[in-house]
Image (tube, coloured by chain):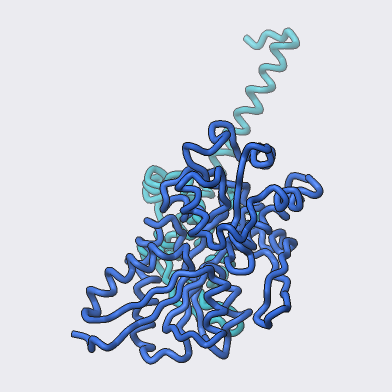
Chain colours: A cyan, B blue
Amino acid sequence: MDDSMINNYEVTIPIERSIQAELLLLLGQQPSHGYELIQRLNEADFKSGEADAATVYRNLRRMDKDGLIKSHWEVGESGPGRRLYELTPQGEASLKVWAQYIAQQKVQLKNFLQEYLLFEASLSERENGVNLI
Amino acid sequence: MMDSKKTLRIIHAGALQRVVENCLEHFGKQNSGLNVELKGVGSREGAKRLLSGEKYDLIALADQALFSELLVPELVENYFVFATDQIVIAYDRFSKGNKEITQENWVDMLLKPQVSFARSDHHLDPGGYRTLMVWQLAEKFYDRPGLCSTMEASCIPYSKYPKSSDLASALFKGKVDYAFLYSSQAEQFGLQYINLPSKINLSNPAYASFYDQAAVSVESKTPGQNVIIHGKPIEFAIGIANSTKYPELAKAFIDLLTGLEGNLILEESGFIPC
């Protein structure tokens, strides 16, 4: 996966779709039905906010349609049958791209914070009457 | 062309009427000549009709838990969750205080003496016991001890509008100011509504253990005896009766409901397909 592909991905993926990355990772770890995914997502350290049922099911249907995941009905042994989702090879590739994109974002955010800390230090020196020029 | 004597009998939650009818429009095109008989009921009542010996081919209920409590395995072997929803407070343009009510002040607004509100019968309709659960959870969520009892005392008697669909109709006709309904019903009737916090509206599986703290006593399958049921995220489910003469036809209907066409119909009717 080269940098141009990651940069292109960055341009085309709105931030709110990061829930798709989170769902792909959870499905990569273990095939699940929607009910269980919502519970796992809300327990995950990496969740980006409260995941409501409508958002999760809408994204699952979209990813199913796009071929990133596939689903089939699983008959429950002691409970109801539910649609079980699992990752496809295409979904696995998408998850890799997401991971690279997030790593790049992490570096950018770290650089931003370093620059900000320098800026903050300069402000503090100015307040203390130190002329930097 | 199908044998004209073939009749598929479907009993369904009143809240699912539009969904079932719209699915049948598509289904009829694929199965010309098929007769269909529909019976819309409160879901708890519907399950009990099967228990009393009434015959149906398909059973679509507003609470998946009713299958395991009342129907599995004697009357239904497998059942499938196909949609979810949430409890909301619905109102219309004539409802008193409709300009002021919010997600934050709904309790105080509904308890004003001049305001009327209603729920369905918890013995017949999941919408009824789910509303009681919402009130119990609101008591904890807002830290207002005694809130559930106060709401029960102030509510229009549940026997007046036993099914959620009766309630939606009463609200639409201006007979009550506010009603606790599924958001899908409010959408279908073109009613306005306020969403409740997800921690109390029974929509989110992430709060399943919090919802479980709510408990309501309802009539069990044994006449004269009650059973305690606990709060759960709202899930609608459908199953095929073991006694059906048309298992393939019934399965084809479920395939339609849970497929792309069905998902679209569910979404258009305000449900969340799952």
Nearer the observer, B213 or B9:
B9
x, y percent for residue B32? 21, 79
Report x, y in % for residue A48: 58, 48
Residue B232 location (% of width, % of height): 64, 65
Question: Residue at the spot x=68%, y=70% of the render?
Answer: B218
- Residue at image position (60%, 37%) is B102
* Residue A28 shows up from this direction: no
Residue that appears at 53% across and 66% down: A34
| Left or right: A13, with B41 as reference point | left
A92 is higher (above) or lower (below) than B187: below
Image quadrant occupied by the N terminus of chain B: bottom left
Instruction: Tell me where residue B162 appears, x and y as whole percent.
Output: 56, 62
**Front-most of residues B273 and B3:** B3
Is residue B234 among the parts visible in the rendering? yes
* Along the line of sight, the residue nearer the viewer: B210 or A109: B210
Q: Please name whichever residue, B272 or A106, is drawn nearer the observer in this view of the structure.
A: B272
Is residue B33 shown above or below B134?
Answer: below
> Please, which residue is most extreme toward the left here?
B1
- At 71% from the left edge and 15% from the top edge, which residue is drawn? A125
Q: Tell me the quarter of the picture where residue B225 sits.
A: bottom right
User: How many numbered badges does the structure rendering display?
Assistant: 0
**In this rendering, would B224 be left or right of B122?**
right
Residue B21: quarter of image: bottom left
> Is B26 placed left or right of B221 in the picture?
left
